[in-house]
Image (cartoon, rainbow, N blue to C red):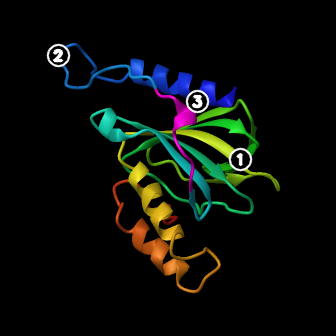
Amino acid sequence: MPFRFAASLALLLLSFAPGASAQSAFAGPQPVIAVDIPAQPYDAGTLRVLVPSSATEGRFSVVELTEHPPYRTPAHVHPEMDESFYVLDGTLALQIDGRSHRLPAGSFIHIPRGTVHAQGSADDRPVRLLVTLSPGAFEQFFLDRVELAKSIQRSDAGFQERLLGIVRRYPRWLAPPPMPE
């Protein structure tokens, strides 16, 4: 059932893509069969790219992330990207603008660009999220982490520096929180 929901939501998102018209090169709604998309392991869990930005002329992308405990992102902002989470399974722990939230399956949150946040599983079970990124292209950050996970584990020496190398490739989309004044 969650796979059908993910595919339905991705279809809905494609149906309402900003700027889509008959004259646009963007083909409009395209079915996404989520069960046909394999999960790829990365350092925090698994990734499935459901709608790549290449399919939306860069307007947005949709990924499914499973984050395994005890993984939590550090506090960060997306300077030029909005991010939305729909919790498919598990419970999401979310820090947003200094407040803590526990979001169970069925919860949705939109995080506008520039909003300080951090997230991960709220307990000892994985959390599975449908993530919409707008504009798209940030899915490549996760694909780079998939490649990283093929050669080194999070617990290995040198992992953190290699991950920071990936982070540095995406300054438009990923930055540390601003320093307090």
Q: Give the mark nearest the N terminus, 3 or 2.
A: 3
For disc 2, the marked residue is 23
Q: Is residue 33 magenta?
A: yes
The number of callouts visible is 3
Q: Nearer the viewer, residue 57 or 93?
A: 57
**Which amino acid, by three-letter code, is at mark 3?**
Ala
- Residue 139 appears left or right of 65: left
The Cα atoms of the two marked residues, 3 and 2, are separated by 28 Å
Q: Is residue 73 magenta?
A: no
For disc 1, the marked residue is 127
Residue bounds of the magenta highlight: 32-40
Q: Which mark is residue 109?
A: none
Is 7 rendered above or below residue 22? below
Q: Residue at x 35, y 61 (%)?
A: 171
Proximity of marks 1 and 2: CB atoms separated by less than 8 Å = no
Residue 175: quadrant of the picture: bottom left
**Which amino acid, by three-letter code, is at mark 2?**
Gln
- Residue 45 appears left or right of 132: right
Residue 178 in view, yes or no: no
The Cα atoms of the two marked residues, 1 and 3, are separated by 15 Å
Element carrying mark 3: helix
**Which amino acid, by three-letter code, is at mark 1?**
Val
- Residue 78 appears left or right of 53: right
Please identify the residue farthest to the bottom as the structure is shown: 157
For disc 3, the marked residue is 6
Q: Residue at x 40, y 18 (%)?
A: 15
Proximity of marks 1 and 3: CB atoms separated by less than 8 Å = no
Q: Quadrant of the N terminus?
A: top right
The Cα atoms of the two marked residues, 1 and 2, are separated by 40 Å
**Is the residue marked by circle 1 packed among few (<14), some (14-19), or many (20+) residues within 10 Å?**
many
In this rendering, the label closer to the viewer, 1 or 3: 3
